Image (tube, coloured by chain):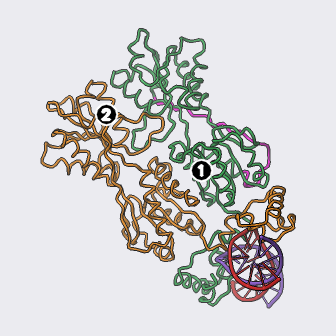
Chain colours: A green, B orange, C red, D purple
DNA sequence: CTGTTAGCGCATTCAA
DNA sequence: TTGAATGCGCTAACAG
């Protein structure tokens, strides 16, 4: 920048003003631009941030594994909000290790991120209190914080499943099958199954299958409706029903949880759990803190949306 | 840091040394640590980088859409290499807009990333020459650079498909079906179809289906082998064959291109296109430049690996 | 509108 | 080993 100033025959301040788009005489600005071109000068944002009151204009996202498609969609949602403010996003994986989680978080803090979006791995995050007290934003995602008082966004998997079943019940169904992974597949799966069971209270016994619908349909009292609790399962159920000629007979509500590149979006009544929306919500919570909001810790529950597309509105055929 | 020094009764240098793990008298170090604790001091990495010879210890990844599962896996591979060097990764989407691509890249450059990993959107990247000349690393991914001379990693989609077909031919198959999206689905799909056609030269006519295998099998001269060109299609073909009792009759080689969370890995002979490996390769190329390698531009082609798992080794049954 | 000056938070010379 | 001084690249006061 010194060189640019020298070559253009102006002071450092003038170069700074040109680079930052502040009002400068057109002739001088042209000289500066020419010098910038010739010298291959590139403005150093970090150095500016040091002096400027504003921060680093960056935030950090940490989760167990950044290759998880759910996280990728979440990250995208965060980016949409962050980009409006020209803030950059750092991302890192914890690999499920609390030690590594702490290490990753502290490195980001060392880089002076203005906020952290954390899909937690460890149990204890009290070590973040100091930074939160110093003004760094912090939002927990998917799991509420236990050892620190901070904002949080969660997806209501259970409520989503319940909404699906209630939708089917409202259309007169009584024998409703659950197709999808069991509780061993993780928190979300377990919650969805629990939601199913809650909403089935007072009806026929549960009709649960790990993944295959066909045996259920072949039974004595086949279900008149199906709830599929995961994206890939939803696609498979759709195809199974189509193949058996039951796609206009057996009602079907699915869950749309991860983006499937290259796959056909299922034309099925869906409970949309949009990771992207969750990311946007989390980012908005975070930036409100960065902007100085100082109220109590908030918990935003992101309610899945039921999108009727025909298959969930079929009436029962006995 | 000044406050810490004052409270500990030492100089700034001593605090700096303690924070950076340089040799310091144990008693003084203890005092410093205590002051750090009490004051809630956090070291500012960016400020240090300004003075230190070393750079920002960060790199940028840019692609069309960071929610793409392929990119997510790529990102993970990059992270594995980057983390060994304690470098952070920034990521951003171009949304398919060359203007936005340039904007995003220049912002990252303004943040003084030491290198850039680019899955290109636009055609012209000559504007990056200045920064490359100034020492910033640059690696193109998936598409070779046209208007700038720089390193590049690509996946050999065409060669992968060819390897699959040749594997089947080596096992005696002559009627081999292609199931998967057409060229309109993008570069990778088009290349795979082209590889199929190349490897089918001299055999029966192509047997191509957009997605459904069943009609082909019901034809007069059904194929004795199937190549499925995409992960989700592979899963569907597997299920179709199983359902028809042909899973031990019709040979099958699939492509495994994106990670499918929560889905069963297909027990099928596979051509693995590992985005993660591509990410590692790209990162290694990049860091060699960051470390000062100054040879000609290199092109690394990441060859997919054929993993025999039984289904691709079935012999033809007429 | 422009130039001068004084730092931002830190690492790194040099002496001691 | 430690401390004092200098400057990394830049912005923000201020005075012109």
Q: State the residue at coordinates (36%, 46%).
A: B272
Q: Which quadrant of the view contains residue A142?
A: top right
Labels 2, 1: one chain: no
Marks 2,1: beta carbons within 8 A: no
Q: Chain of mark 1?
A: A
Q: Is residue A177 magenta?
A: no
SS under mark 2: helix
Q: Which quadrant of the view contains residue A23?
A: bottom right
The residue to which callout 1 is attached is A78
Which x, y percent locates residue B263?
44, 34
Q: State the residue at coordinates (64%, 74%).
A: A20
The residues tagged by marks 2 and 1 sit, at their Cα atoms, a distance apart of: 36 Å
Q: Which one is in front, B34 or A22?
A: B34
Q: Which quadrant of the view contains residue B29?
A: bottom right
Which x, y percent locates residue A163?
58, 26
Q: Chain of mark 2?
A: B
Q: State the residue at coordinates (44%, 50%).
A: B276
Q: Which residues are magenta?
A: A288-309
The residue to which callout 2 is attached is B237
Q: Which one is in front, B92 or B298?
A: B298
Left or right, B258 with respect to A276, comes to left
Which x, y percent locates residue B294?
43, 74
In this rendering, the label closer to the viewer, 2 or 1: 2
Left or right, B64 with respect to A93, comes to left
Q: State the residue at coordinates (68%, 69%).
A: B48
Q: Which one is in front, B131 or B285?
A: B285
Q: Residues within 10 Å of mark 1 (few under 14, many from 20)?
A: many
């Amino acid at each position: 920048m010194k060189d640019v100033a020298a070559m253009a025959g102006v002071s450092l301040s003038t170069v700074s003003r040109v680079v930052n788009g502040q009002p400068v005489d057109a002739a001088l600005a042209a000289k500066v631009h020419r010098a910038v071109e010739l010298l291959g000068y590139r403005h150093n944002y970090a150095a500016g941030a040091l002096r400027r009151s504003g921060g680093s204009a960056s935030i950090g996202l940490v989760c167990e594994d950044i290759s998880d498609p759910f996280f990728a969609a979440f990250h995208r949602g965060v980016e949409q909000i962050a980009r409006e403010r020209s803030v950059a996003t750092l991302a890192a994986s914890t690999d499920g290790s609390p030690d590594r989680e702490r290490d990753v978080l502290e490195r980001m803090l060392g880089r002076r991120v203005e906020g952290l979006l954390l899909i937690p791995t460890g149990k204890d995050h009290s070590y973040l209190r100091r930074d939160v007290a110093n003004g760094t934003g912090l939002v927990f995602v998917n799991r509420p914080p236990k050892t620190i008082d901070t904002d949080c966004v969660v997806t209501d998997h259970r409520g989503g499943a319940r909404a699906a079943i209630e939708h089917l019940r409202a259309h007169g169904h009584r024998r409703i099958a659950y197709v999808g992974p069991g509780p061993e597949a993780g928190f979300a799966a377990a919650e969805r199954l629990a939601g199913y069971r809650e909403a089935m209270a007072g009806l026929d016994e549960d009709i649960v299958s790990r993944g295959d619908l066909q045996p259920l349909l072949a039974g004595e009292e086949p279900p008149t409706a199906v709830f599929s609790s995961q994206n890939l399962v939803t696609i498979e159920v759709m195809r199974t029903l189509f193949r058996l000629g039951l796609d206009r007979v057996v009602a079907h509500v699915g869950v749309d949880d991860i983006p499937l590149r290259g796959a056909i979006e299922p034309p099925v009544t869906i409970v949309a759990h949009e990771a992207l929306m969750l990311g946007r919500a989390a980012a908005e919570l975070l930036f409100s803190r960065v902007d100085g909001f100082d109220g109590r810790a908030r918990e935003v529950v992101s309610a899945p949306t039921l999108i009727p597309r025909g298959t969930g509105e079929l009436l029962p055929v006995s």
